[in-house]
């Protein structure tokens, strides 16, 4: 997993910690952004920010009232972890407000909110196993320019996993496998196309062929590696130079796609 510079903006506008234990209220108000409508579309009790904060406060035995504002720049259902990163940010903000550090209670609440939330507590580059709660930091770093292309298709994560239909034993990564992955990451990024793949691609590309077309166009526009992010629907492409990435961005935008140029955050 890799953290990107593309981000939403979450602010804690109000907090009241005088409420009795177990009494936790979490409000999230829209503060603009391209995808601001998503905030109103998600019921308060289903929002990952609310789930994470309530779980955290319950675990430490405190009550409270929190009001957040959110500028939403990351699309949902896009395999970019927008909701998960929001939940992680909210947890860190609340823990700082309470003058607590990153502890087991914080990670437990992150896991309760969603499989990808624990990663965003740490960020950077990491291997993730289990449901995402087992994280192994990696010193790997990459300075490539990253193009993200999203054509607005919302991929249902549950359906993607169901369609994948792989036994858990096939998804386990052993120590030797991790060693090989690290070697392949470091040995040369121009060989990544040979070594790395996303198991979800055949499933999602069959359901939505137009997503697979975008991956081909990434290579046509000079990417040295391209793949689908998570269970989709975003396709990312890695480029050596900003100039090449900008040319790719302009080419892909002319076809009506949402295209973002960003970098890895380490």
Image: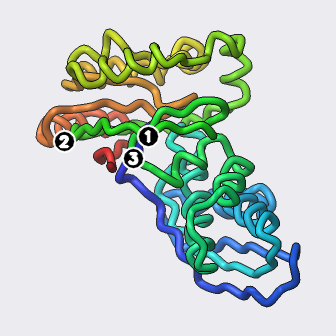
State the image coordinates of residue 244 (x, y, percent, origin top left). 14, 35
Q: Which residue has dot 2 on it?
A: 246
State the image coordinates of residue 22 (x, y, percent, origin top left). 88, 73
Tell which circle, 1 or 2, labels the residue nearer the N-terminal end. Answer: 1
Circle 1 — which element?
Answer: strand
Cα distance in 3D space between marks 2 and 3: 24 Å
Tell which circle, 2 or 3, labels the residue nearer the N-terminal end. Answer: 3
Residue at 71 percent across and 52 percent down: it is: 108
Tell which circle, 1 or 3, labels the residue nearer the N-terminal end. Answer: 3
Mark 3, other Cα within 10 Å: few <14 / some 14–19 / many ≥20: some
Q: Evaluate if marks 1 and 3 touch, with contact meaning CB atoms under 8 Å apart.
A: yes
Q: Is residue 258 visible?
A: no
Q: Evaluate if marks 2 and 3 touch, with contact meaning CB atoms under 8 Å apart.
A: no
Q: Is residue 28 above or below residue 204?
A: below
> Toward which corner of the image does residue 227 lie, by quadrant?
top left
* Nearest the eye: 175 or 74: 175
* Mark 1 vs mark 3: in front: 1
State the image coordinates of residue 178 (x, y, percent, origin top left). 44, 21
Circle 2 — which element?
Answer: helix
Circle 3 — which element?
Answer: loop
Tell me how the rendering is colored.
Answer: rainbow
In this image, 255 relative to 105: left or right? left
Q: Which residue has dot 1 on it?
A: 137
Q: Which residue has dot 3 on it?
A: 124
* Nearest the eye: 250 or 52: 52
Residue at 61 percent across and 71 percent down: it is: 95
> Toward which corner of the image does residue 65 lie, by quadrant?
bottom right
* Mark 2 vs mark 3: in front: 3
């Amino acid at each position: 997993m890799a953290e990107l510079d593309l981000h939403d903006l979450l602010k804690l506008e109000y907090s009241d910690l005088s409420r009795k234990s177990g009494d936790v209220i979490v409000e999230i108000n829209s503060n603009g952004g391209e995808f601001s409508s998503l905030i109103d579309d998600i019921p308060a009790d289903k929002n990952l920010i609310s789930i994470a904060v309530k779980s955290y406060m319950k675990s430490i035995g405190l009550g409270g009232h929190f009001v957040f504002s959110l500028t939403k720049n990351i699309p949902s259902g896009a395999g970019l972890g927008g909701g998960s990163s929001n939940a992680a940010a909210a947890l860190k903000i609340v823990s700082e407000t309470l003058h607590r550090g990153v502890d087991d209670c914080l990670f437990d609440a992150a896991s309760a909110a969603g499989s990808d939330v624990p990663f965003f507590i740490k960020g950077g580059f990491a291997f993730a196993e289990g449901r995402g709660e087992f994280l192994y930091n990696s010193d790997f770093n990459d300075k490539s320019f990253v193009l993200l292309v999203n054509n607005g298709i919302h991929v249902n994560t549950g359906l993607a996993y169901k369609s994948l239909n792989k036994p858990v034993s096939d998804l386990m990564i052993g120590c030797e496998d991790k060693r090989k992955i690290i070697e392949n990451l470091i040995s040369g990024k121009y060989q990544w196309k040979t070594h790395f793949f996303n198991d979800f691609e055949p499933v999602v590309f069959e359901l939505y062929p137009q997503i697979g077309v975008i991956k081909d166009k990434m290579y046509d526009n000079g990417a040295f590696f391209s793949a689908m992010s998570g269970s989709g629907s975003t396709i990312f492409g890695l480029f050596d130079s900003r100039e090449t990435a900008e040319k790719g961005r302009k080419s892909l935008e002319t076809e009506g796609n949402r295209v973002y140029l960003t970098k890895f955050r380490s």
